[in-house]
Structure formats: structure tokens, C-alpha cells
Image (tube, helix red, strand yellow):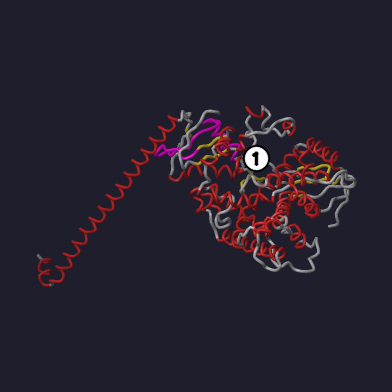
Amino acid sequence: MNNLTLAQGHPATVQHLASAYTTIKTTELGITHVILVIFAISFTNFINMLWKKRNFLLFAKSAKCYPVPQAANRFPMPWSLNRKYEVYKGVLRGNLFDNHFRRMHEKYSNTHAIVSAFTGQQKGINTIEPENFKSVLGTNFDDYKRSKYRLLAAAPMMPPGILTLDGHEWSHWRSLIRTQFTRKNFDANIADSERHMQLTFKAFGPVNADGWTGEVNLMDHVYRLSMDTVTQFLFGHSAETQSAKLIRLGLLPAPSSAQPFDLDNFAETFAVAAYYVGHRIKLSNMYFLLDSLAYRRACRSLRRMTSAYISSTLSRSNPKGTTPTSADADNAGTSVITSLFASGATLEDITTQVTHLLVAGMDTSSATLGWIFAVLAEHPEKYAKLRGEVVSVFGTEESRLAEFDLERLKTWLDGREPVAVRKGARVQLGVYLAHRRKDIWGEDAEEFRPERWEGRRRGWDFTPFSGGPQICIGQGYSVAQLSFAIARIVMRYDRIEKVEGANNLKQGWQSVLTPAEGVRLRMHLAEGSKPLEV
């Protein structure tokens, strides 16, 4: 009664109440419509998923594909958070491959599927079968594409380039770059690498009266060695990261004239950016969770330094600044970037492709050298045998028998049923575990036994450089540089030993599998090798 009286006394209030009621009804109708639309979309997607699943099963049946085992997800979570947690737990503990992935393959077979716990839809295939490697990388290469998340995760350090592209663009850049990976250029780079090895030996530090160095963390030095030799090859002149560090430590005099570009801290900046990219790629569709101002700053600095370095190289090779012609392409020199410039590529394009090549060559080469000497330190008899072979072919530092070149280095080193894969599913080729299968390599597959390669023909059961059309473009370069570095180190030092308390074999993850705690060694200078002044 009081409300009615109030309303009668204030006609505007009645209008407001009526308007509010109408708004509430309209809002209710709007919410209902939204709910109906969401339900309709969800239902449509569900039916579409069932239809695709039905078609996939029919395809698998018609193609007579083997029903691949499915890896169960005990505690399903959105975006496969539990699987990502298991992966990163393995990374932190240093046993990602030997524990997590090995356990998966032992439990679910050499080839198994990862499926959605909610829909049962195939999300990926994990395999360690060489025949499947052959299918994905070779026989049916055109049926498989790189994950779109790989491209997104690599940005902004690596704009779309040779490691993230597919199809015509990938083929275009690969055909331009591969022309530089020749024996002539390899031999020239090996000759240039002797100076970088001398700087690396100086960085190892002095030897005591008994001929032993102090503690050396090999990874610090081989990372810079790899950076300097690969930039020598790609740019035509080296980044000189080893020299820069020795100058900072006062172990080398500063150059009389400054470089026209600043490459101090290039190796450190590259390492920061590459660390983020490696882990972002592991996160797949959740790559965006790993980001920071430090990563963005490193990417900007890296691109600035690389671009300045390339501009300097191009200025040296083309001081007049003329437009490249087809004749220039045939006389572009031995540098990858001068060749790309002669083909008409822009500075932006060259910077991008060179960054991709640095990523491809840097971590892989340094990690390989690290693992080799980490394992050799555990097997002194293998080190002694290796040194004996090097000395018999190349001599000692005091008395050389032959020069290092690609030909001599090469001579010295020298589940079968079809499985249906859903379009868009990720296929993970477990190279690490495939290289340790006892049914392929014998009961001693886990042991370090270099002699197993004597007389063995390599096939799809051994794919350290991938295979097929996308086989590593720098395979020859990597083998030559790694062989040279190994030969020079064992030529100079006749013994190595692990530092007490060092855990050199603990696995870590950057963009590749790498020694997590470095490779801490002491090295004994061979008789006839002269100590370097430090």
C-alpha cells in the first residue's frame, strides 16, 4: 500500500520500474540465446568430431592399418597439462629420455598413439621404429608437415625460415643455401679453424709442472668454438667470441682498431634466446606460457648484432653497393650470405636464414663435442685408442704426418605394419631411444662401444642428421668440424680425467640434449706439445 502510494505520488518511478522490468526480461532472453548458441556450436563440433573419427576408422580399416596401442592418460587435464608436467619433470631431473619416454615405449610398444582423454581422438603418434622414420622422412615425406606451433614458438628469435617452413618456400631457401656446403668450402673452413683451436687451447688455461690443466668446463669453450667456426663459414669471417672473452679476461691484447659492429656478448645473447626457443617448442600449443622481457631483449639484440654483422660482410664483398647480377651469383665467394645476396635476397631475408642456420649448427655441434669427451673421460682406454689412431694418421703437434682435410677426416671416422595417422596429429620420432634398442644394436646397446661401427652399414636405424629431403643440410660441415676438433684435442692432450664430484653425464635440455652440469675435466698435455703463453 505504501509502495503504491509512493508510485502514485511519483509517476516517473512507475516508468523506471517498468523499464527495469523490460531490461531484465531482455537480458534473460539474451542470456538464453547465448546459451542456445553455445550449445548449438558445441553439439555441432561434437557431431563433427564423431564424423571425423568414424571416417578415420574407416580409412584405417580400408588401408589395412594395424590398430596401434593407445597411451592411457590416468589423470586427464585440459591442454594435456599433466603430460607437459611429466615432460618437464623429466627435464629437471635429467632423465627425460631414459626414464619418461623409455617407460612410455616399454609400456605401450615401440609405436603408440596419444589420444584425447575426453574425445578419444588421436592427437599424436610416438614411434622408435626405423621403418616409420623412413616413411615420415623419406617415402611419404610430402604427407607430413612441420607443426604450426613450431613456427610460433620460435618467434621472435626465428621468423619463418628454413627450419620452420614447408613446401615451396622451404625448397627455395634450401636450394640457395645448399650450394655453399661443398667440399672446397669445408676444407677452407677446416684450415681457418686451426686458429680458433689455438684460442680454445689458450682458454683451457696453463698446465702445472706435471702437465695437467686446472679444472676445465669444456662446454663453455666448445660453445664458443662452435660459434666462431660456424660464423666463419656462414659469414666469411668469425664472430671471435673466444677472442672477446680472452680480451675481457686480459689474456689477449685488445685489437688496435675497433670492429664496425659490436659482437661482444654475442654468444651469451644467443644462448639465452636459444634456451627459450628450445623450451617453447617443447610446450607445443602452450608455447606462449614461456616468455619474458629477457627473452624479448635477447631476440632484439641478437637480430641487431646479426644484421650489423651481415651488413659489414656485404660491404666488404660489394664496396660499391651495386645491385647483384646473375654473374655475381657465380662469383659470390665462399660465404653463405654473399651467395644469398647475389641471388637477390634482402638483408631481412638473409638475417632470418642465417639465424636459422646458427640455431641448427650451434647447440648441436657444441653438445655433441661435450657428450663425446664426457663419455671418453669415463673410458680412458677408448681415449687412448682414439688418440693412437689420430697420431698414426695425422702425427703429433711436434711432428705432423698429414694436413687435416675432409677426405682424410671422413676416412678416419668412417614394427613393420602400417599405422593410420589422423590428419593434424603430431608424429614424434624417438631417435634417442631408437639408437638404444637392444633388438637392433645388441645387448650392449647402452654401452659406449665405438667398435660397433666397424663394418656396419648405416640405414634408417641410425638417423642423427634426420633423413630424406629434409636431411640436415650441414651434415658434411658438422662431421668435418667435429672430426677436426676431436682430432686436435686428442692430439694435444694425451689423457683426460673427470674432475672429482663432476656429474658430466647428467642430461639437460636446451634446443637439444646437452650435458646439464657442463663437462668438467682435467687434461694432460702430450709430450711434444708446447704450452701456450697465458
Looking at this view, name the residue that lies furthest to the front.
327
Residue at 28% x, 53% y is 34
Whether 24 is among the magenta residues is no
* Camera-nearest residue between 397 and 479: 479
Numbered disc total: 1
Circle 1 SS class: loop
Circle 1 residues within 10 Å: few <14, some 14–19, many ≥20: few
Report which residue position mark 1 lands on: 464
Quadrant position of the N terminus in the picture: bottom left
Q: Label 1 sits on what residue type?
A: Pro
Q: Residue 472, position in %: x, y? A: 64, 45
Residue at (78% x, 38% y) in the render: 411
Q: Is residue 488 left or right of residue 173?
A: right
Q: Position of residue 9 (x, y in %)?
A: 11, 72
Q: Nearer the viewer, residue 283 or 475?
A: 475
Mark yes or no: residue 278 visible.
Answer: no
Q: Position of residue 502 (x, y in %)?
A: 72, 44
What's the magenta region? Answer: 96-124
Q: Is residue 139 above or below residue 202?
A: above
Q: Position of residue 293 (x, y in %)?
A: 55, 61
